[in-house]
Image (tube, grey):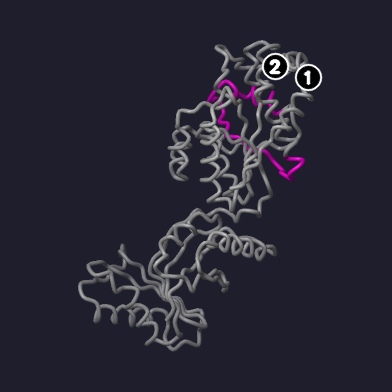
Amino acid sequence: MKKLLLIRYGEINLKGSNRNYFINSLACNIKYALKGFKASIRKIQGRIIVEDYDKDYEDAIVSALKKVFGIVYITKAFETKADMDSVKAASLEAMINKQGLTFKVESKRSNKQFELTSPEISKAVGAHILRNIENVKVNVHEPDVLLTVEIRQNAYVYYENVHCECGLPVGTGGRGAVLLSGGIDSPVAAYLMAKRGMKISGIHFHSYPYTSLNAKQKTVDLAKKLSEYTQGFALYCVSVTKIQENIIKNCRSEYLTVLLRRFMLRIAEKLAQEKGFQALITGESLGQVASQTVESITCTNEAVKIPVFRPLIGTDKVDTVRMACHIDTYDISIKPFEDCCTIFLPRHPAIKPSISKVLAEEKKLDVQNLVDQALQTVEIIKL
């Protein structure tokens, strides 16, 4: 009898001829998540098994695997010989600490040569548990413990399911870069795109010395949290201090925010071309602030040709906060350190800017030179 963790995947099963690509990618990501543990993995039909691990670290292993996109459930299980004596022994082991609880046994018999039918397996296992474990009862409608017996070449007894993040394996959906501020929204946007299989890096814009080193560290801390979901994370830190100073000096104040956003996208597009990112990601939500109206978004999009994904565009702030709490970034995001987008906010920003007026203001600036200077400040932090 061997204790193991059974990895179950969902959406991957819907893939066609490229299903093995997704399964192999998931297996690689599981190995990455377990690199700090002694464990091995193997694939069986429709499942990935984690085994030969130190049982004292089971909770930590499960915690790490819960953040691997593509996994729907982690099932705690025993693998044993495909005979009833072994199945009964494994079932008792699974229920040994479940006194006072109700249970139900379900059976699946893929191996049709097995001596008993599925209902007969369930009946025999249930009776054996009732005879050997005190103070447990059967409840076929709402059991505390659902014990599943599956007969393949070997027998498997499943006794606890841990719900995971679902989604698709990171790396199967291309590469993208999130414009990572220190706020609540952009880390959640990165999380959502990673959940769809995109390998995520981050681009952080700062205005040191107007913004503090604490503000930069906050973003690094957010990137560390995201790295737990993204199999590592590269953060590119870029100074836009000179850009903001030039905009303030030469342009009308109400266009400061939209002009800065256009510069950010231009710089991010240059980094994307250099690093192989296929899309940019922002945490914008329609109508949340002046820079997130349809008109403002249209003006910022016009500055670049690369796709810009906004997974939160129709999301309520309450839902975004809920997701931030789920991925443990919320408490970091609300630390009171200002980012470059908030320190020079105009009193009356343009809510519905026209592209013609924005371009007229932009002509007052040496755009290409400012972009090139900003790219010279790039600092890379690998997490």
- Tell me if 63 is positioned left or right of 188 in this view: left
Q: Quadrant of the N terminus?
A: bottom left
What segment is highlighted magenta in the picture? 272-301
Along the viewing direction, whichever of 82 and 260 lies nearer the viewer: 260
**In percent of the image, x 45 and y 28: which residue is there?**
336
- Tell me if 288 is positioned left or right of 142 in this view: right
Q: CA distance from mark 2 to mark 1?
A: 9 Å
Q: Is residue 144 magenta?
A: no
**In percent of the image, x 41 and y 70: which residue is there?**
55
Percent position of residue 328, x then y: 45, 44
Circle number at residue 366: 1
**In percent of the image, x 69 and y 25: which residue is there?**
262
Residue type, mark 1 in image: Asp
Q: Which residue is label 2 attached to?
A: 246
Q: Quadrant of residue 270?
A: top right
Number of residues whose C-alpha sits closer than 10 Å to that of mark 1, classed few (under 14), some (14–19) or many (20 or more): few
